[in-house]
Image: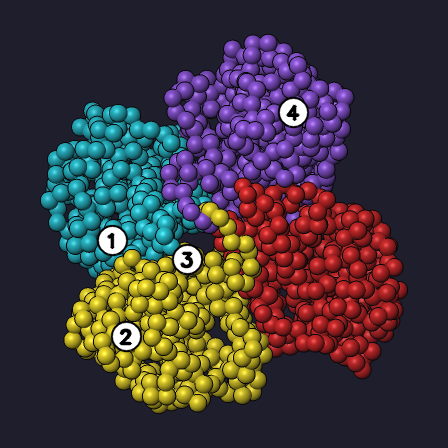
Chain colours: A yellow, B red, C purple, D cyan
């Protein structure tokens, strides 16, 4: 962040930095993979107690109601010290959606559990045949009295094998046009009939899962919004998700890699390496500047250009990690981080992981289509 | 996007009205002596005082004001040296010497055009030379050289510039590469404080150029989106072709990022990160302008390559401005050295 | 060209270099704009007498029948000394098409005139409403006995105001589907009813022309191929044109700029500048390598991937000129070439001119579509 | 595209058959000691002698033969150190000393795996270190150091490498950064002629890696084109979407250019431009592989990011190979220094 900070902001930054230095356990620093719940939840709860787990949530729901500047300060300090990535589906996705569309009962039950780390969430959207074309999904939910009986197959479910609950889209009405007849529902993953299979990724981690539903009986009270009315919610959620996908947190973590490599290289970095470092710094500064312009709670009228932010954030991160690969030289393909002069340097893991950024949360191709359509209002055509 | 305040909108629009359609003046110039009529109007309206404190007869404007105004003004393609004037006034005011004070007064009155020359490297001056952009406008060139106590800020008169050849630039302007003989010019200020003021002006030049570049991008892109909706081939508007849609979306994102960074840099002026932020903003805006303008020409097809359409002068101005007041590469290289 | 040259090739290179050094007039060296006919034709004829004006033409038609290697040697040496760009529409476009589709009479009349520089040609395809979508052209040719009467409006006619003849597409039949009913015809520009208006370009030169036809009476013998059968010819010509648009001649000229700037900068070029120079050299080497693989006369069976070569050539040239702009630093926007230490350096002109490369000869977007369709055989779709 | 001769096709296909599906061996390795069964078959078939003159018991193959064979073999993802073996045999043959001769004989017999280590810079070794790729395979590492008359080519035994930590790479292999203590290792040859042979081998390593990278690109791109025709979304194959079509066309062009340059560089081996050509080919092939493989993953969507599909190991091998035997940046930087 380049702008002049107010005294309050400076004080907040000092507080965050000191607190992180004092509180973040050594074994959670400089991890490249998201630590598993058993390892991470203690820290999650510590942040929760401190009141910093949900900077972007309104105070009314137990969040910080933090300004974009405060959010960026938290992200910058977390990147600097190498704080781990934590489960985000609850905080960034289903949390905000329940705040907007949930019943008071649903809010009361689920929001505190997200904040204090009692429940880890995952997202059940994609299916083998339905990726970018989400509305073609085929997992069925049959209404039977007070229950909805779900049968189907979700895939690419991030952290599905670690999660306690899933929020899913199921087709509850086959008669209606594709985008109608879809219901948004909350499902306890302990229910009978659910099986999960982790999927290894390009980055050699189990980030994904397949989730199979075999006549899983879910209380109808778990429907968010109205039956058959899930599409509007998912559209809203995608926007919500994209804003958080547009946060510079990943890019800042990536930049920290580049900075550490540059430091390790010292004078060997040379003129062309310095140019690359400066490029990385500039790209992340631009992304951060763009994120700082997302509307605050006080500016409800302005709709953020969430698709642009998602593209900018993910492609900036990827570009910065490309630079990291360049600076890594012969060490670029090393699998595990290595310690160099007391600093841990990750060479390839974040780079490999980052390939997913432009795929998930609506591929960047889908985002470009949305921008052409909604922002630029370009004409729709007859044929490709 | 950071939206301008209603006050900033008023300021910007009044300047745009004053500048009118700058294209004909830009085309007409072609390296020769400029027509100063519009410039005198600009000075009489008080614009060069935008960043001066009200106590010094200025408007007490902020860097954000400057950015908002220049972003809008750029699209007029007016050839007048606005960026340089806005950034140079605070420098002359900061000198605190009689010659500088007199120069400022003449400048604000529209009588004397004072432009800063910038140390820059090129194949024409591999060891560096003081490049004076918009040279035909300059009655006086301001040059800063030396370090610390040895820093000297001097003013060269137009007679002292004549030896350096005038070289035309593709936007209708021209530049000279000045050299500074020992003892040449009139001393305006010296020492570390003068150096500080000089570098602050360099930051403003970069920020102003960055804002202008983003303004050029905005206009060229708006024209392109309009053209995509209007021009039909193969029985439909070309804007319906997905390959062009996706590229247009990328251009939109690039513009938004550059503009965000320019606004952010304006919020950094006066702080610790001013230097870094202005260099970044200039680098990013220049690179974005180079990239987006090329795509705008491409998407227009042959008409984009014709000089009879406004895209060509927008393109040439963007190329010119991208390399003025610090090329992107020079700005980034500086960052790398300090970082 | 990187490959080891045979002794014959080395000897040819020496001959070309020595001859150019001895023969090329000083006032034709290092020009950035194509010199006008009055200035250039002497040199054109000198090359013609030497037998080097048409390296890629078969010997049977008076060409050199040169191998790709010999063609590249000629281009490299021309770039090195700064030889001017000459009129190419006759040599690269209508010449080859007449060789393939012309009557013996048409060949006898026009080919020698192209070779010896007596006739300069231009191309009449584009119209105000028909650019990429060429088949929508509306210039009409009405058959009246032994004549075809042409009325219409061509635009973006390269060098139209300097040309003696135009080869044009006109619609001779309104009843047939769009791609039928188009006739390919040769028109003497001195005929009554033709007016021309030059158009200035981005690069501030008059490269283009508008050509207006007002009931121009053209002998029917000037039709190439059959009446209403011009589309097949234009398709063949576009391929022919693309191969020559795929030659590295422009890229080599661009590279020469970069090399001269690098030399002028000397040690100031620095590590990052050297990297840029190396990048430019590598890109041009790759393009040259690709061009060297175009089939020779002896390998008629292999169809060249002309669209790929056109994209590669034009985008390589543009990339190299981007690098030139970078190395130029503060001098990047200088309008006219300047002499530095005895060498002429062009800063912006070729860069500005090069913007047209990806537009003419079928835009690079059209080429990408052709590759998707013809080479990759990707499916055709229903809507954009 | 340069088409392989019928003989080259036969050679290539017989090697591909010998290598079989290398993916499982690649995945299985994970930095540990390799299974040498396939390697022994390769040696028994005589492959490491490809570039040796027939008089020395080799096949008298050319650089073009090597390029054609390795381009095809790369797609198998076999973990065996083929490139290094092919390039090292001529080096050992050129030494003309007893130890080198013995080493070559053992190598050709499949008993001893001899790999060259390469001076390279990284954040782990900012002052440079001898990086040994595919370290778990190496019984002997060959290191060249010094200049002119002081050049020495030495062989380190596996015992002499053990101090350097084995670091796993993402393609299932591992590397070590070796150092060369004074007097360590066994002298194979010295002086300018040895240096010349050593640098010729470096050129072959780069060329071989470049050919392999193009082979990886070819396979990944073919899979992608197939997927684009097969995967449907929004009621049509995604390959019908123009934005993807145009990107696929760009990938095709990039692949064609890289392959053309690799073939051209093979035709330069033995000539004045060998060094430059091989460095260019390696730089270009690496950059193309990095770029195209990323787009292949993106176009596949989530399945491209899954390890259960062959694209993931292709991607990881490409990333690994792009940085082996001279990163693109190092190759280009060398060019710049010589140019």
Residue on which the image places disc 2: A166
Could one spot residue C84 in this view of the protein? no
Q: Nearer the viewer, mark 2 or mark 3?
A: 2
In screen coordinates, is B314 left or right of C229? right
SS under mark 3: helix
In screen coordinates, is A292 left or right of C167? left
Who is closer to the viewer here, D176 or D156? Answer: D176
Q: Nearer the viewer, mark 4 or mark 3?
A: 4
Q: Position of residue A54 (x, y in %)?
A: 40, 83
Could one spot residue B55 in this view of the protein? yes
Residue on which the image places disc 1: D309
SS under mark 4: strand
- Give a yes or no on whether discs 4 and 1 share a subunit: no
The answer to which image quadrant residue D263 occupies is: top left
How far apart, in angstroms, are the residues tagged by discs 4 and 1? Answer: 58 Å
Q: Is mark 2 in CB contact (under 8 Å) with mark 3?
A: no
Q: Is residue A172 above or below residue B221?
A: below
Q: Residue at point 38% right, 57% down? A: A325
Q: Nearer the viewer, mark 4 or mark 1?
A: 4
SS under mark 1: loop
The answer to which image quadrant residue A135 occupies is: bottom left
Q: Residue at point 29% right, 38% down? A: D71
State the residue lying farthest toward the front: A175
Mark on residue A270? Answer: none
How far apart, in angstroms, are the residues tagged by discs 2 and 3? Answer: 34 Å
Residue on which the image places disc 3: A322
How far apart, in angstroms, are the residues tagged by discs 1 and 2? Answer: 26 Å
Q: Position of residue C200 (x, y in %)?
A: 72, 39
């Amino acid at each position: 962040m380049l702008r002049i900070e107010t005294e309050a902001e400076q004080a907040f930054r000092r507080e965050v930095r000191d607190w992180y230095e004092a509180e973040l356990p050594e074994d959670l620093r400089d991890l490249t993979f998201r630590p598993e719940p058993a390892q991470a939840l203690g820290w999650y709860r510590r942040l929760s107690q401190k009141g910093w787990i949900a900077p972007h949530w309104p105070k009314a729901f137990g969040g910080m109601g933090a300004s974009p500047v405060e959010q960026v300060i938290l992200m910058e300090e977390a990147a600097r010290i190498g704080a781990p990535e934590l489960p985000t589906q609850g905080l960034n996705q289903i949390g905000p959606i329940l705040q907007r569309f949930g019943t008071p009962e649903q809010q009361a039950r689920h929001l505190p559990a997200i904040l204090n780390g009692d429940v880890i969430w995952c997202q059940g959207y994609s299916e083998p045949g339905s990726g970018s074309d989400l509305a073609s999904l085929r997992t069925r939910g049959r209404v039977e009295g007070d229950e909805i009986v779900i049968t189907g197959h979700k895939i690419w479910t991030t952290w599905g094998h670690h999660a306690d609950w899933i929020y899913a889209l199921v087709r509850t009405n086959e008669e209606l046009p594709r985008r109608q007849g879809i219901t948004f529902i909350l499902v306890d993953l302990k229910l009978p009939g659910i099986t999960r299979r982790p999927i290894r990724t390009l980055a050699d981690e189990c980030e994904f899962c397949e989730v199979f539903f075999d006549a899983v009986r879910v209380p109808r009270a778990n429907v968010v919004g109205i039956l058959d009315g899930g599409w509007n919610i998912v559209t809203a959620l995608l926007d919500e998700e994209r804003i958080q996908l547009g946060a510079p947190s990943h890019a800042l973590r990536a930049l920290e890699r580049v900075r550490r490599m540059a430091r390790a290289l010292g004078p060997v970095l040379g003129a062309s390496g310095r140019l690359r470092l400066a490029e990385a710094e500039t790209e992340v500064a631009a992304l951060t500047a763009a994120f700082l312009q997302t509307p605050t709670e006080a500016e409800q009228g302005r709709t953020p250009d969430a698709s642009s932010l998602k593209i900018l954030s993910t492609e900036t991160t990827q570009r910065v990690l490309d630079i990291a690969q360049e600076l890594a030289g012969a060490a670029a393909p090393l699998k595990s981080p290595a310690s160099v002069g007391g600093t841990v340097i990750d060479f390839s893991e974040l780079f490999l992981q980052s390939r997913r950024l432009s795929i998930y949360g609506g591929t960047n191709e889908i985002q470009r289509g949305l921008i052409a359509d909604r922002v630029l209002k370009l004409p729709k055509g007859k044929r490709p | 996007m950071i939206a301008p305040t209603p006050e900033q909108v008023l300021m910007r629009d009044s300047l745009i009205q004053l500048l009118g359609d700058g294209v004909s003046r830009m085309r007409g110039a072609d390296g020769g002596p400029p027509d100063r009529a519009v410039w005198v109007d600009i000075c009489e309206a008080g614009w060069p005082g935008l960043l001066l404190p009200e106590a010094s007869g200025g408007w007490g404007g902020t860097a954000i004001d400057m950015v908002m105004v220049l972003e809008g003004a750029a699209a007029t393609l007016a050839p007048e040296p606005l960026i340089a004037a806005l950034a140079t006034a605070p420098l002359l005011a900061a000198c605190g010497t009689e010659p500088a004070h007199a120069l400022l007064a003449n400048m604000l009155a529209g009588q004397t055009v004072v432009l800063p020359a910038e140390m820059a490297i090129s194949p024409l001056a591999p060891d560096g030379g003081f490049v004076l952009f918009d040279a035909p406008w300059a009655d006086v060139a301001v040059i800063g050289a030396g370090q610390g106590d040895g820093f000297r800020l001097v003013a060269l008169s137009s007679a002292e510039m004549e030896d350096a050849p005038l070289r035309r630039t593709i936007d209708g302007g021209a530049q000279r590469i000045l050299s500074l003989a020992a003892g040449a010019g009139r001393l305006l200020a010296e020492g570390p404080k003068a150096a500080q003021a000089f570098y602050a002006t360099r930051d403003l030049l970069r920020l102003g150029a960055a804002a202008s570049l983003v303004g050029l991008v905005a206009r060229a892109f708006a024209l392109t989106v309009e053209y995509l909706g209007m021009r039909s081939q193969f029985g439909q508007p070309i804007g319906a072709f997905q390959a062009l849609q996706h590229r247009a979306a990328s251009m939109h994102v690039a513009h938004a990022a550059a503009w965000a960074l320019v606004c952010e840099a304006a919020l950094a002026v006066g702080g610790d990160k001013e230097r870094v932020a202005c260099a970044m903003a200039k680098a990013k805006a220049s690179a974005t302008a180079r990239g987006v303008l090329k795509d705008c020409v491409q998407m227009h097809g042959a008409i984009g390559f014709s000089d009879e359409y406004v895209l060509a002068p927008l393109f040439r101005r963007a190329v010119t401005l991208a390399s003025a007041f610090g090329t992107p590469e020079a700005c980034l290289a500086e960052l790398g050295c300090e970082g």
